[in-house]
Amino acid sequence: MFTFEQLKEKDPNLSFEKITVGTEEAALFGRDQILAVARRLKDEYGFLHLMDALGTDRMEKRDRFEVTYNIRNHKTRQRIFIKVRCDERDAHVPSLTSVWSGANWHEREAFDMVGVTFDGHPDLRRMYLPDDFEFYPLRKDFPLMGVPGSIPLPHHEDADPRFSVADRGE
């Protein structure tokens, strides 16, 4: 079974923080190392399948945003997670689409919902929200009832009157 220490043995200059996600192994890498690590995990250790990737708002002053890649080796049936963080003022991380083409959709979703920019992504544009929408709904400081006057919310006649669209000035 793969361990992150195997990466460290081959490259003593590699630095990471070992963590766990549930019962699975995970490691947090720097932005300058994540692309090379991903390529090695695929080419040398058989982690051919990117199962999922997601962006998270940690709501911390430093390294506010985190991107988690969930990858799997089908031969050993092992699943691991690699993570990378970035600050709000410089919300850029390298795209892993050159390693796993399936990262395309997941990175676009993280860009659209959290606002992390993936440098080197072949088609980084919004997928759910209009191109001119200035906000990111999965950020923890996003208003729960949306941004007044931005995108009209659907309204149903049986909806709770306490949450009337009319109260939002629309």
Image (cartoon, rainbow, N blue to C red):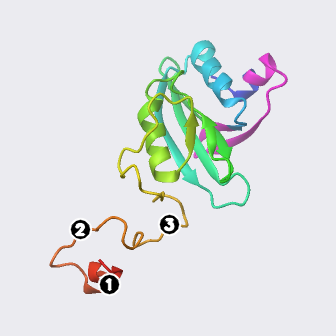
Q: Amino acid at mark 1?
A: Asp
Mark 2, secondary structure of its residue? loop
In this view, the mark in front (3 or 1): 1
Q: Is residue 17 left or right of residue 141?
A: right
- Most distant residue in the top direction: 44
- Badge 3 density bin: few <14, some 14–19, many ≥20, Cα 10 Å: few
The residue beneath circle 1 is: 167
Q: Looking at the picture, which amino acid does disc 2 mark?
A: Pro
The reply, left or right, for residue 11 in relation to residue 135 is: right
Residue marked by disc 2: 154
User: Helix, strand, or loop for circle 1?
Assistant: helix
The mark that comes first in sequence, 3 or 1, is: 3
Residue 12 on the magenta span: yes
Residue at image point 44% right, 71% down:
144
> What type is the residue that disc 3 sits on?
Phe
Residues rendered magenta in the picture: 7-27
The reply to whether dot 1 and dot 2 touch (C-beta < 8 Å) is no
What's the distance in space between the residues labelled 3 and 1, CA to CA? 18 Å
The 10 Å Cα crowd at callout 2, few under 14, some 14 to 19, many 20 or more, is few
Name the one closer to the observer, 166 or 35.
166
Q: In terms of secondary structure, where does tag 3 sit? A: loop
Q: Residue at x 40, y 69 (%)?
A: 146
Q: Which comes sooner in the sequence, label 3 or label 2?
A: 3
At a point 37% along the width and 66% down the height, the residue shown is 150
Q: Where does the image place residue 90, in percent across and percent down from the top left? A: 67, 47
* Residues tagged 3 and 1 counted as in contact (Cβ below 8 A): no
Q: CA distance from mark 3 to mark 2?
A: 19 Å
